[in-house]
Amino acid sequence: MTALPTRSDRSVNVWLSAIVVLLIAGCDTQTSTKPQQWVSRDSDEMISPGHQEMLAMLNEIHAWGLQSDPFLGTQQLNSARRRLAELGLAKNAAHRQRVDAVIRVANQELRLGLIDKAIEHYSEARQTLPKIAEKLSSEDHQRYLFQIAIGYLRLAESENCVHCQTGESCILPISGGGLHGQKIGSEESIKVLEELLGLNPDHLAAKWLLNIASMTLGKYPEAVPEDYRIDPSKFAGEPFPKFLNNAKKMGIATLSLSGGVIADDFTGDGSIDLVVSDWSTNGQIRFFVNDGNGNFKDQTQATGLTGIFGGLNLVQADYNNDGHIDIFVLRGAWRGSLGRHPNSLLRNDGNGRFTDVTFDVGLGDVHYPTQTAAWYDINNDGHLDLYIGNEDFPSQLFVSDGEGHFTDIAKKAGVTNDRYAKAVSWGDFNNDGYVDLYVSNYGSANRLYRNNGDETFTDVAGELGVQSPLNGFAAWFWDFDNDGILDIFAASYNMSIEDVTAPFFDLPVKGELACLYKGSSEGTFKNVATEMNLTAAVDPMGANFGDLDNDGYLDFYLGTGYPAYESLMPNVMYHNRRGERFADVTFSGGFGHLQKGHAIVFADFRGKGENDVFIELGGAYPGDAFTNAYFSNPGFGNRAIRIKLRGEKSNRDGIGAKIQVDFSADGKDQTIYRWVNSGGSFGANPLIAHVGVGKAEMIQQIKITWPATGCHTVLKNVKVDGQLIVVNE
Ligand SMILES: [Ca+2]
Ligand SMILES: [Ca+2]
Ligand SMILES: [Ca+2]
Ligand SMILES: [Ca+2]
């Protein structure tokens, strides 16, 4: 594979010329050198050299990726095709070798979305298999049949769900508008799965997919042989009102691979806009402006974001405290040393435009593969700092100098982690006024870095017993039980389709489960996942939390899956039953989407005091694009207040502020706590505290603790009607 150019090899000249310009400009003299120039973006706007440099680098990465990207490139297909061609020439090549080579080609074609070619090859293999069945081991025979069945199933998804989807497509249990009109894919898949189950009646994944494929034809449960049938009661779940997927109606049903999402008010008109990324090396970041009623308009081109490609995850912050929320894009995830792609800081210029300032502010000197970062003010100087969790490379802690420039102090601070970071989250767990950092690592122990208050940190995860799960992915600080003390949710990502589906067949789950660490006022933690009913096998990547029903308790949604096409597992929603347990409302609430779930947001897009849920769907491979889903809140008859902070000594949006809301509802005095931040680790909620207060019409007191100073602002007797209130420091 070709090595990707790094910033250090390719941009020395750019930097040298920039230095020359600065020196000369300082002396107010003309220069005869030829530095990078601002160029015209359109008739009335110029593009900065830093923005141009990013566009050039992203183009270069795409050119490299076309062939060499391990998830997106053609290299593996080309070598599989060469192998097949060589066998074609060898007259004595055995059928068996040929079947193997044909299936390898088909798998690669499926990965790249060349579905017709893949189906031709799978059907060739299917016809040849009976001739060689006796010579094959049962394992190989099963593996081939499984891959052929997956090919047909993907054909079914492609013809019915990807290209002519309805809001019900792919939502388990599949019914109504989710039924397939083009039946060939599912029909053929069912035949092959039944043949496979004839060889191995215990093949869990085949049994699961047989039930799903039958559902798509409206033939579940009757037509599924009893030995393989899932009891329909497994798809009931606990009662919950149904949310409908209205993405198409909202104007945001765009087709993309896996990616990130931010919901926040980028235009400053009070309604929540959407920014969505696609991790393809030519996946265009998209900017949707909300008209205030949840109708979105794609304004990507007008914002100057054209050519800003890629990014598995996004996170927002007003890094320069100018009142305009900026965007940070994370790139290179899962690609190891091939993923040393630059991240992007996209400055919101406040005039409807964004400028890539990564290289100008010191965030682009070295590149490491990453998909997780979080902004907080680690030293209480009122300027947001940024921690980036990298994958098997040193993680970075960029401290702001308050003048728009960042310096990586991770080494001195003791937070390089040097593990495969998949989630980072800030929270002051010991309530000493300095924010602490949880880092979830895939394949090794998680970290809890306690902030020592002097820009150094100490990992206390072992001492406090919060190192698990060892296959970490999504993780965050939150207060799930409203006792005013931060807790930690830490998911595990080690399940196969067999593990996830085992409970549907009343089989035990083998993999490692998520942890829910309840915090105490002494700064210790206890894992209460089992008591809280978090015992299901789930494979979450994207994940976020928010209050679905305005009862004041935070619910959460997990976007699940892994790159392989067989990973058709429902995304999972948990409803928080007043901090006493979590109820799985995946199926009753209409959230069991089968496509691979990445970034998630909970946001009040319609300004009605109710959270809707948006999930970025689509897989890692070019053949696995899917349209994103928008689940509209049906309404629960409860009230909420939304609180937007305006920091003065603290950072502008009050990231890190603690908000305490006291009210009476249902004849009881209640207190709800929120910390201002973007929520979970994959998907960024608005930097607005959304506080559900049940039936309460009046809040007795709102108490805000500002992050930089620890000072309080107190509001008394606030009427509740779903409104947004702005509180100045
Ligand atoms: Ca800004
Ligand atoms: Ca700071
Ligand atoms: Ca602390
Ligand atoms: Ca708590």
Image (cartoon, rainbow, N blue to C red):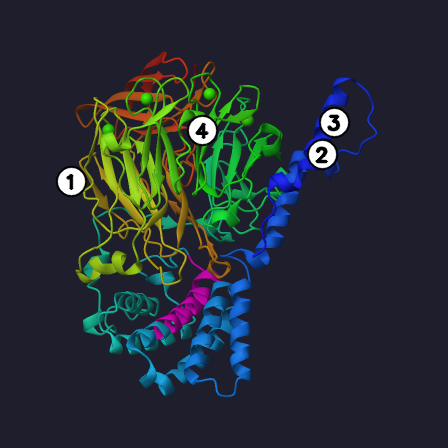
Q: N-terminal of the two: label 3 or label 1?
A: 3
| Pointer 3 residue | 20
**For the residues bearing labels 4 and 1, Cβ distance under 8 angstroms:** no
Instruction: Give, as a single range, the part of the protein colored magenta.
Output: 145-166
Which type of secondary structure does the marked residue at label 1 adopt? loop
Mark 1 burial class by Cα count in 10 Å: few <14, some 14-19, many 20+: few
Q: Is residue 573 magenta?
A: no
Measure how far apart labels 3 and 2 are at the Cα level: 25 Å
| Pointer 4 residue | 411
Percent position (x, y) of residue 363? 55, 32
Percent position (x, y) of residue 348? 58, 31
Is residue 573 visible in this depiction of the protein? yes
Give 329 or 181, whichever is nearer the viewer. 329
Percent position (x, y) of residue 567? 35, 59
Q: N-terminal of the two: label 2 or label 1?
A: 2
Tag count in the figure? 4
Quadrant (top left/top right/bottom left/bottom right) for the C terminus: top left
Measure how far apart labels 2 and 1 are at the Cα level: 58 Å
Measure how far apart labels 4 and 2 are at the Cα level: 40 Å
Which type of secondary structure does the marked residue at label 2 adopt? strand
- Up-down: is 303 above or below 197? above
Mark 4 burial class by Cα count in 10 Å: few <14, some 14-19, many 20+: some
Give the quadrant of residue 644.
Answer: top left
| Pointer 2 residue | 45
67 with respect to 399 (left or right): right
Give the quadrant of residue 686.
Answer: top left
| Pointer 1 residue | 531
Q: Residue at x 44, y 35 (%)?
A: 395
**For the residues bearing labels 4 and 3, Cβ distance under 8 angstroms:** no
Circle 2 or circle 1, nearest the eye: 1
Amino acid type indicated by mark 1: Glu
